[in-house]
Image (spheres, rainbow, N blue to C red):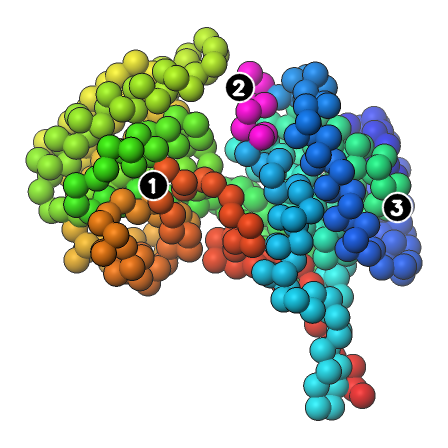
Amino acid sequence: MIFAHGSLLPDSRLPGLLAGLEGELNAALAGPPLPAETVLAALDALGRRLAAGEFDALLRRFLPAGELARLGEVLPLFTRDVLEEKLRAELGPERFSPRERRQTTARFLPLGVLLHVAAGNQPGLGLFSVAEGLLTGNVNLLKLPREDKGLSLAALSLLTEAAPELAGFVYAFDLPSSRTAELKALAGLADGIAVWGGDGAVETFRHLAPPGCRLMEWGHRLSFAYLSGPPAAQELDALAAHIAATGQRLCSSCQVIFLDTGDFSAARAFAEAFLPRLERAVLARRAGPWESARAALSGYTAFLERVTAGREPGEAFFRGRGCSVTARPDRELELSPMEGNVLVKPLPRSELLPVLRRQKGRLQTAGLLCAEEEREALTALLARAGVTRITRAGRLSDAFPGEGHDGEYPLRRYLRVVDVEN
């Protein structure tokens, strides 16, 4: 399906729509600017209706089993208070107001047309990306991920129904990545492309983007927990709950638990002791047979892959019900098997920076478990290593009002500065 002109259209309309899309986009850009207040009111109203459960029956048609709860993690981002805090944090109290200089006035205008390439690892991500584009007054083209079974289309329909003036600023296309001709046509119309996805998606749109098009890479990132000293039981339980809740599918999900030690036997002992906590969290979280089967398959696949490839000397694999913990003697940050299957590795703080620097550009969140008197020193070390977000161990994937994204403020990247001589 296609979303255009505030309506859902069949895929058969795509050739005709693409043929006239440049003219439509130019008309929107030449028209009155989109007031931020209009966007704030519309997003807040949509968020309230979704949070109230008004559309739960509709949403169940578009979300796989267990995903409706994960949509709830995104809904707090669509409240007026959070959105206004985001505008203040990223653009300052003056927001879009002109800034007087000695000889010029700086005006802040939309970049123009944004193409959003959404990833499928978080329900509602495409809608959130479009919301950022609307807040900055841009016209938005959304490429839906394969996993989106109609959620974004339904949400955009509700949004433009509440605020019809937004209809000319939002288009969505259910196009697979194999449709390179159509994707190239969309990229050719864009002033900027926001890519949420892995290396393959980023590389594809680097080739499709025309010269001069701004490419914003919100690509896949790696996150981890770092444990120094004896941890509190409640913090370990919170970390286990985080791993179970996210399925380790998010960029902010814990993939590896690093211990501040060079002793692998300590890592092995921790892995064995952590398994019961993780198992309790996983069993409490799993809502149905589909989720349990997916977790079990991931765990068995991880186990078979290690058997086939050959385990590293001393590696220890602890399998529980619907989850596993693997202790490995190497120091590398890597993607875990996910779905409740976490890795544990020794990493003394003296080696932390050079090890993490090997993943520069891919680092995101570190969940830090340590004594309070050491938190600032370890926070500074993690930040110098390239980590862009540092939280408590159980809060790696929590959203905080006004926070950056991968070390940047997206709204600033979706604007351009026009200097006008006084």
> Residue, x 72% and y 57% (percent of image)?
136
Residue 31: horizontal and vertical position, in percent? 91, 58
Mark toward the start of the polypeptide (1 vs 3): 3
> Residue, x 39% and y 32% (percent of image)?
242
Q: Quadrant of the C terminus?
A: bottom right
Tell me if I can see residue 335 in this picture. no
Membership of 227 in magenta stretch: no
Q: Are marks 2 and 1 in contact (CB under 8 Å)?
A: no
Which residues make up the magenta segment? 64-72
Where is mark 3, residue-wise?
Answer: 165
Tell me if I can see residue 104 in this picture. yes
How many other residues sit within 10 Å of disc 1, few (<14), some (14-19) or many (≥20)? many
- Compared across the picture, whether 380 is left or right of 318 comes to right
Label 2 vs label 1, nearer the camera: 1
- Compared across the picture, whether 107 is left or right of 404 comes to right
- Compared across the picture, whether 335 is left or right of 399 comes to left
Q: Note whether 168 is above or below 293 in the view shown.
A: below
Residue type at numbered disc 2: Gly
Q: Residue furthest bottom?
A: 102
Residue type at numbered disc 1: Ala
Q: Note whether 51 is above or below 346 in the view shown.
A: above
Residue 182 in which image quadrant: top right
Q: Note whether 272 is above or below 91 in the view shown.
A: above
Mark 1–mark 3 Cα distance, whole angstroms, equals: 43 Å
Where is mark 2, residue-wise?
Answer: 66
Where is mark 1, residue-wise?
Answer: 393
Residue type at numbered disc 3: Glu
Residue 45: horizontal and vertical position, in percent? 76, 38
Task: Name the secondary structure under disc 2.
Answer: loop
Work out whether residue 315 or residue 87 is closer to the camera in this orientation and state it: 87
Mark toward the start of the polypeptide (2 vs 1): 2
